[in-house]
C-alpha cells in the first residue's frame, strides 16, 4: 500500500511538470525596412489607379484574397485596378505599414488603414477600415489577404456594370 502511495504521488508530480511545449511565435516589428517601404509603394500605385507594378513583386503562382475571395496574380491586379473605374479620390487614411520578422522564419508585412473613396457614378462617399497582410518568401510576396467591407465596391460595381449595358 505504501508503494502505491509513492507511485501515485510520483505520477502526479511528473504529470504536473512543464513539458516545454511552448510554440510561441516571437518576432520583431519594424516600419523602417525595405519590405514595408515596398508595400507603401504598391499601395500608392493602387491609390493612383495602376497596380500593374505589383507583377514585379508578386510570386507568379501566389494566392491573393480579398476577404474570402481567392484570386491569382492577374485577378487581384485587375480587381484592384478596376476600383479606379468606379471611384475617385481613393485614399488609405491613417495608414500604418510594418513588417514582422518571426522566429519561425516567416516574414509578413501588415497594412492598416481607413479606406475612403467617392463614387464616380453616384457621388456617394464611402469610408471603411481595412487591413492587409503580405506574406513574403525571400523577395517575393507569395500571398496577400485584404479585409475591407466590400459594400461600397459591390454596390458601385453593380451600378457601373448596369450603366455599361
Image (cartoon, rainbow, N blue to C red):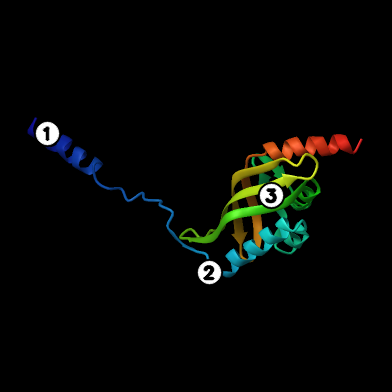
| Gap between marks 3 and 2 measured at Cα | 26 Å
| Gap between marks 2 and 1 measured at Cα | 61 Å
Q: Nearer the viewer, residue 15 or 67?
A: 67
In front: mark 2 or mark 1? 2
Q: Viewed as shown, does residue 53 lie left or right of 39? A: right
Residue wearing tag 1: 5
In front: mark 1 or mark 3? 3
Q: Nearer the viewer, residue 21 or 106?
A: 106
- Give residue 62's position: percent from left, percent from top: 70, 53
- Give residue 125's position: percent from left, percent from top: 69, 43
**SS class of the residue under badge 3?**
strand
Total marks in image: 3
Residue wearing tag 3: 63
- Which residue: 67% across, 39% down? 150
Mark 1, Cα crowd under 10 Å, few <14 / some 14-19 / many 20+, is few
- Which residue: 78% across, 51% down? 84
Mark 3, Cα crowd under 10 Å, few <14 / some 14-19 / many 20+, is some
First in sequence: mark 1 vs mark 3: 1
Instruction: Point out which mark residue 32 bears.
Output: 2
Q: Where does the N terminus fall, quadrant-wise?
A: top left
**SS class of the residue under badge 1?**
helix
Amino acid at each position: 500500500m505504501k508503494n502505491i502511495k509513492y507511485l501515485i504521488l510520483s505520477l502526479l508530480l511528473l504529470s504536473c511538470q512543464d513539458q516545454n511545449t511552448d510554440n510561441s511565435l516571437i518576432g520583431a516589428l519594424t516600419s523602417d525596412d525595405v519590405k514595408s517601404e515596398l508595400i507603401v509603394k504598391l499601395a500608392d500605385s493602387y491609390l493612383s489607379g495602376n497596380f500593374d507594378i505589383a507583377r514585379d513583386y508578386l510570386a507568379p503562382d501566389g494566392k491573393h484574397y480579398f476577404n474570402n475571395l481567392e484570386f491569382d496574380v492577374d485577378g487581384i491586379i485587375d480587381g484592384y485596378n478596376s476600383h479606379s473605374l468606379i471611384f475617385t479620390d481613393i485614399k488609405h487614411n491613417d495608414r500604418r505599414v510594418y513588417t514582422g520578422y518571426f522566429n519561425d522564419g516567416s516574414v509578413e508585412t501588415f497594412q492598416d488603414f481607413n479606406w475612403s473613396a467617392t463614387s464616380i457614378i453616384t457621388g456617394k462617399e464611402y469610408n471603411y477600415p481595412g487591413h492587409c497582410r503580405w506574406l513574403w518568401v525571400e523577395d517575393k510576396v507569395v500571398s496577400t489577404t485584404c479585409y475591407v467591407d466590400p459594400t461600397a465596391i459591390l454596390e458601385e460595381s453593380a451600378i457601373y456594370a448596369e450603366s455599361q449595358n
